[in-house]
Amino acid sequence: MAEERNRVSMWLLWLVGILWFAVAAPIVILSIFLLEVPLWPSFSEERTVEGTMVWAVLTVWVYVTPVVLFVVVRRRRR
């Protein structure tokens, strides 16, 4: 039972990592191409609260997820 749970959690870890890469890689590539800092806010006067919240969620996903994945993998190896 413990081995099965371990296998499922490993698959889940890989799935989150792949999803993160699928979102973050195009952002980083476009940022390098445009010579910009990835997801740096430059909001105009016409911004909406919803747009700002989408930006915040995407930014947290791109910057926090790899840190969480790194911590989880380090704890699993102990």
Image: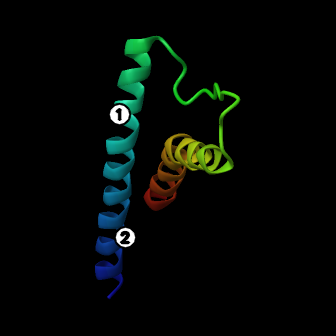
Task: From this view, report whether residue 1 is shown above or below residue 58.
Answer: below
Identified by mark 2, the residue type is Ser
Q: Going 48% across and 44% down the picture, which residue do you hit? A: 66
Task: From this view, report whether residue 4 is shown above or below residue 56.
Answer: below
Which residue lies under the disc numbered 1?
25
Identified by mark 1, the residue type is Ala
Q: Going 50% across and 57% down the picture, which residue do you hit? A: 72
Q: CA distance from mark 2 to mark 1?
A: 24 Å
Residue 16 rendering spot, x and y as whole percentages: 38, 57
Question: Is the Cβ of the residue at disc 2 closer than 8 Å to that at disc 1?
Answer: no
Residue 33 rendering spot, x and y as whole percentages: 37, 14
Badge 1: residue crowd in 10 Å (few <14, some 14–19, many ≥20): few
Which residue lies under the disc numbered 2?
9
Residue 40 rendering spot, x and y as whole percentages: 60, 26
Most extreme residue toward the front is 46
Q: Going 41% across and 27% down the picture, which residue do you hit? A: 28
Horizontally, residue 78 falls left or right of residue 18, namely right
